[in-house]
Amino acid sequence: QSALTQPASVSGSPGQSVTISCTGTSSDVGAYNYVSWYQQHPGKAPKLMIYDVSNRPSGVSNRFSGSKSGNTASLTISGLQAEDEADYYCSSYTSSSTYVFGTGTKVTVL
Amino acid sequence: QLQLQESGPGLVKPSETLSLTCTVSGGSVSSGSYYWGWIRQPPGKGLEWIGTISYSGSTYYSPSLKSRVTISVDTSKNHFSLKLTSVTAADTAVYYCARRSSAVAVAAVLWGQGTLVTVSS
């Protein structure tokens, strides 16, 4: 299985919105509504931000939202804040009963 | 609250076996309805899912690592383990242990802090 494809970097000014795409195949992203998103700050373990395409775990800001169309999922961060600067990874369940991560996107707050 | 802590050698020689343990504190590894697994991240690179073991003992491994990986649970010691055979420099990474509930189809919800394993002679 190949890693899901994400842009290497996105950036935005405080208060703006940014969207990160995550492209897979009909065997992973397109097959199930089991796409999740993780935030990782330098030197830290990843943190689950979105699961099942668009659900937020308790405690995650509603500035984070997810969606999916076909083989591509997206994470949108609204009202960008300095603390949102981090690496973001998508992940999907696959038809082989395994999981695959995306290539990762660095979000920079200008 | 439940916490996970990885432990094991930080340096492994090429062709040898990498062995890591994840100790579960504040809870039991034999609690029903949870999956226990491993994820790694080479320095400066992205996350790679290694595999998981279910509460019923079923294992699921990354196709690219399947021939070299074993994940097991030791309920008497309240920990689970990772073994990766025939390692090369490409296996150098931070290794995270993780847990998820069977109710949520994600790679991981709860993560350990991670441990760096370097493969070098």
Image: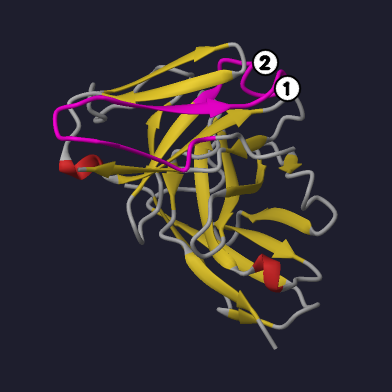
- Calculate the distance from the C-alpha at mark 2 to the C-alpha at mark 1: 5 Å
Q: Residues within 10 Å of mark 2 (few under 14, many from 20)?
A: some
Q: Are marks 2 and 1 in contact (CB under 8 Å)?
A: yes
Left/right of residue B114 with respect to residue B85 in the rendered view: left
- Does residue A14 show up magenta in the picture? yes
What numbered label is drawn on residue A31?
A: 2
Left/right of residue B17 with respect to residue B107 in the rendered view: right
Left/right of residue B61 with respect to residue A34 in the rendered view: right
Q: Amino acid at mark 1?
A: Ser
Residue located farthest toward the bottom when viewing the structure as drawn: B121
Q: Which residues are magenta?
A: A6-35
Please give the chain letter of the residue carrying mark 1: A
Q: Position of residue B58 (x, y in %)?
A: 74, 38
Left/right of residue A42 with respect to residue B105 in the rendered view: left
Residue lying at 78% horizontally and 49% vertically, measured from the top left: B64
Q: Amino acid at mark 2?
A: Ala
Dot 1 falls on a residue whose secondary structure is loop
Q: Mark 1 = which residue?
A: A27
Front residue of B89/B87: it is B89
Q: Quadrant of residue A50?
A: top left
